[in-house]
Image (cartoon, rainbow, N blue to C red):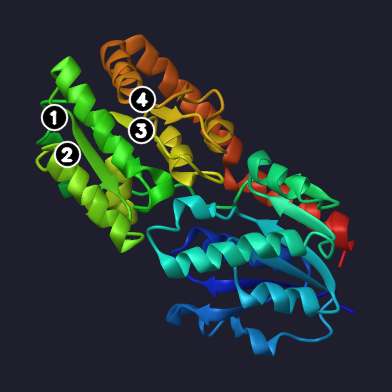
Amino acid sequence: MTISVHQLVPTISPRDAVGNHTLFIRSLLRAAGYDSDIFSMFRHPELTGETFYIDQLPADADALVYQFSIGSPIADRWAQHGGRKFINYHNITPVEFIGKWDGLLEAEVELGRDQMSRLASICEHAICDSDFNRSELDSLGYNSTTTIPVLFDVASANPDASTLKSINKKKSGLQILFVGRIAPNKAHHDLIAAVRTFRDVYQNDAHLHIVGTDGPPNYRKMVDAVVAHADMADHVTFHGSVTQEQLVAFYQGTDIFLCVSDHEGFCVPVVEAMHHQLPVIAYNSTAVGETVGQGGLLLNDKHPLTIAAALNKLNEDGNLAGRLRRAGVKRAACFNRETTSNQFTKEFVDLMGSP
């Protein structure tokens, strides 16, 4: 009789990091010989034909994997089920980064943090994206945890020619890139302050490119106010959501990837930047340092003058930039999908036995 290992996730979307990871896991489970489907409360229209609503979850499923990244009633459905229970933990942003910006998201985060504690005694085993995430669950008393990086396809495509051309038009100064949702934990306001300081202190006509969708509207308003107050409107471009070809153009056409996030559970764009030989400067917080490893320049504080000095050093020292490019490619290779897929497959076979 076939062993069933189903996944539960609050929302499933084909262009979301957790959503794509969940779809990849389903493919691995099926390829290994398990019966595996995805059940959620909310489904992207593109996936309604191949995923299921939570009320369709079979009562006799052998095991359930909960993709955990936010508070949701799905967690309670998982907890009440009679099958074996596993968690794949992607991190929940602490409420202090959310509260004053988005009341609804604050409630979801608080619920998620509460569920993290309550589910410790129920979860048989948890797989975490990073050792940082793993340490959170260990501190809450989870009995069995391990670390396997998130499954993703590194951004790879032919770069969009018009995007490359638009970047080259600004080549009078350093072209700095950050990729990530405009959210408080990613500290876009600090990015702007650092680039403004770099421009002033080192007389460099630097330009900051920000790729990513909007998060809490009130935070975006604050970021816009910082841009205006710093007189940076002509030196910061918000590109919003972009195609894969455009994203590759940004990685290949800019000079430095700068990350000053206060909280990350993994940070896929850092890996993508390293893969494309874009030198990385990053604030060593939460899981960022773990992800960057020896592949970039890590800073232990993010005072604007510290960041500005690092930007100038990398801009003027071609040998250092070359070493970082080579180190970044080597580090990015540690997260290639084939390696991570094999880790996940072995983990499930070890947990469930051969199907």
The image quadrant where one finds the N terminus is bottom right
Residue identified by numbered label 2: 167
How crowded is the residue under tag 2: few (<14 C-alpha within 10 Å), some, or many (20+)? some
Q: Residue at x 55, y 44 (%)?
A: 266
Q: Horizontal placement of 345 versus 350: left or right?
A: left
In the orientation shown, which residue stands out farthest toward the front?
100
Report which residue position mark 4 lands on.
303
From what the image shows, is residue 347 above or below residue 319? below
State the CA–CA distance, disc 2 to disc 4: 27 Å
Q: CA distance from mark 2 to mark 3?
A: 16 Å
* Mark 3, residue position: 258
- Three-letter amino acid code at the position of disc 4: His
| Disc 1 to disc 3: CB gap under 8 Å | no
Q: Which residue is mark 1?
A: 171
> In screen coordinates, is 344 left or right of 355?
left
* Mark 3 crowd level (few <14, some 14–19, many ≥20, 10 Å Cα): many
**Lower sequence index among marks 1 and 3:** 1
Looking at numbered disc 2 in the image, what kind of residue is underneath it? Ile
Q: Earlier in the sequence, mark 2 or mark 4?
A: 2
Distance between mark 1 and mark 3 Cα atoms:
17 Å
The mark nearer the N terminus, 1 or 4, is 1
Is disc 3 placed on a helix, strand or loop? Answer: strand
Residue at 57 percent across and 42 percent down: it is 336
Element assignment for label 4: loop
Distance (Cα) linking label 4 and label 3: 13 Å
